[in-house]
Amino acid sequence: MMVVSLFLVLGVSIEVSASSDYDRQEADACITISERLSVKGGSGTKDIYRAVGVDEYYDIMDTGRFRGVDGSLAAKEFGNDFNETLDFANRSINRDKVAIIKVTIPEDVYNQLNHMNLDAPIFKSGTPVVEPDMLEYFNNSILNIEHAY
């Protein structure tokens, strides 16, 4: 009998037992799935924040994903710091911003974003931007999404 134990980022231990060739195939399938989960979780995570309007807020909360909504840009600008994002949302030019969404992604995904200096006087820690061609990959990499403010 073969026993395989895996510890995932989520702190869940998976034990797979196999006593025949057929069971070994199932065990291999479980290991493959858990390896994907491990890769998705990565060794580190990063929280980023996005100020959103009413329509985008409900769309994100309904779907758990970011996408183009009427009146929004295709690229998605985030802040690295909650307080900087809140400051941005409170500016008079951003009266339509009603909430801040916190997104947790693997650090390796964060490193692939377009790191720009948009609104540099406000976002002193930078503004990671999800470009339209990376949006699907970004959405599939989201570990947690929540209403932060």
Image (cartoon, rainbow, N blue to C red):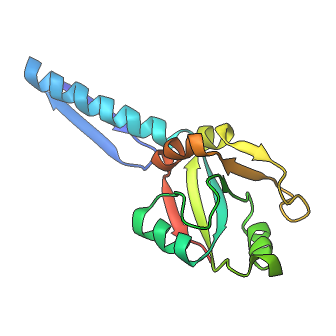
Report the front residue among 116 and 133.
133
Q: Is residue 75 above or below residue 15?
A: below
Image quarter of residue 38: top left
**Is residue 80 rendered to the left or right of residue 5?**
right
Number of marks: 0
Q: Position of residue 22 (x, y in %)?
A: 9, 22
Q: Is residue 1 visible?
A: no
Position in image of residue 72 (x %, y %): 62, 64
4 on left or right of 51: left
At horizontal 64% and vertical 44% (from top left) the residue drawn is: 110
Residue occupying image coordinates x 55% and y 46% = 135
Residue 30's image quarter? Answer: top left
For the N terminus, the image quarter is top left
Is residue 89 shown above or below 140? below
Drawn side of residue 66 relative to residue 112, left or right: left
For the residue pair 107 and 18, the one nearer the viewer reads as 107
Q: Quadrant of residue 97?
A: bottom right
Q: Give the farthest residue toward the top.
A: 21
Q: Is residue 136 visible?
A: yes
Quadrant of the snapshot with the C terminus: bottom right
User: Residue 50 in the image: x percent, y percent?
Assistant: 65, 64
In the rendered view, would you say 118 is above or below 57? Answer: above
